[in-house]
Image (tube, rainbow, N blue to C red):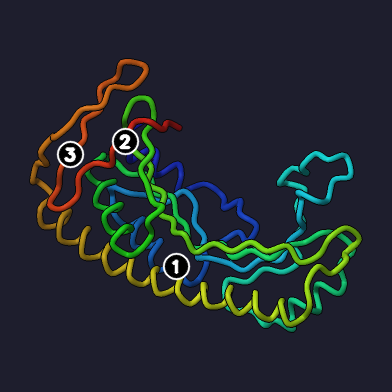
Amino acid sequence: MEFSKRKDVAMGKVDLSRKGSVDQLIQNLITYINTKEEYFTTSSCSGRIVLLSDTSLSSTSGKTTTKKHCRWFLTSHQNVASSKVISTLNTLDEPSKIKFEPFIVHVQCSTLEHAQLLLKAAIAAGFRNSGITMNKQCKHPMVAVRGTLCLEVPLTGHGGHRLTSDEYVDHVVAIANSKMVDNELRINKFEKHLHTSLDCEITTKKSKKLTPVKEFKTTDGIVCKAVKSNEIDCVSDLCSLFI
């Protein structure tokens, strides 16, 4: 399927996320990416603090409960008050944990060179866990923009037994809130780098050819070319992961 048709199909799909819409904090960013004919987003989250069931402890059989049976007790895409977390904990009768999950977005790209431009902006903004995934035909690469600002702490055990004091919950929530602030700063930085990268290198230099510097051969014998654009080379082992 041609990239433009793939984009039309993706943009026409119903949002099946829990929230059912793009998070407000990244609404402008997601809209900007999708206005570019070379890109479209497939999933995103601005970052969140979540209090949820700890499925690793909730099964008496010793087997981990599947993700779809995980229960969410509290979720926020902004800072939360520790008093709200504590009051929620006091109502629980099962294992739980608090998590901070940073910003993430998956972007389908029309070509490898366009994927590189996006990856360059992501890494410059501090999202150093970002990467490119290729399919077997080495067409339409996917860029996952993600960082390292994670946090996961168990708070209650079996029967809802509290594992920590209120003071420790205060401490953990404060850390999660500080990560939320840092996360938003990185999102803003990413958006600025993205505007600079895409508006300058795609709009004003759209016809410029990039220089092949290396080839990768997949296990199926398909040859994929890496390219060099300004300061960034293709990520090593670019074709080692497939979707």
Q: Residue at x 44, y 67 (%)?
A: 27
Q: Where 69 sits versus 99, above or below?
A: above
Give the CA distance from mark 1 to mark 2.
28 Å
Left or right: where 183 falls relative to 200: right
- Quarter holding the C terminus is top left
Q: Where 220 sits versus 234, above or below?
A: above
Q: Position of residue 178 (x, y in %)?
A: 52, 77
Comparing labels 1 and 2, the label whose residue is closer to the camera: 2
Q: Nearer the viewer, residue 73 or 24?
A: 73
Q: Please, what is the three-letter code of the amino acid marked with disc 3?
A: Val
Residue pointed to by mark 2: 238
Left or right: where 102 falls relative to 6: right
Query: Looking at this rendering, what residue extends furthest in the top direction?
Result: 221
Secondary structure of the residue carrying numbered label 1: helix
Q: Position of residue 215 (x, y in %)?
A: 20, 27
Q: Please, what is the three-letter code of the amino acid marked with disc 1?
A: Ile
Marking on residue 26: 1
- Ranked by sequence position, the earlier of labels 3 and 1 is 1
Pointer 1 with pointer 2, Cβ within 8 A: no
Secondary structure of the residue carrying numbered label 2: loop
Q: Please, what is the three-letter code of the amino acid marked with disc 2?
A: Leu
Q: Where 170 sits versus 220, above or below?
A: below
- Ranked by sequence position, the earlier of labels 1 and 2 is 1
| Badge 2: residue crowd in 10 Å (few <14, some 14–19, many ≥20) | many
Left or right: where 97 falls relative to 104: right
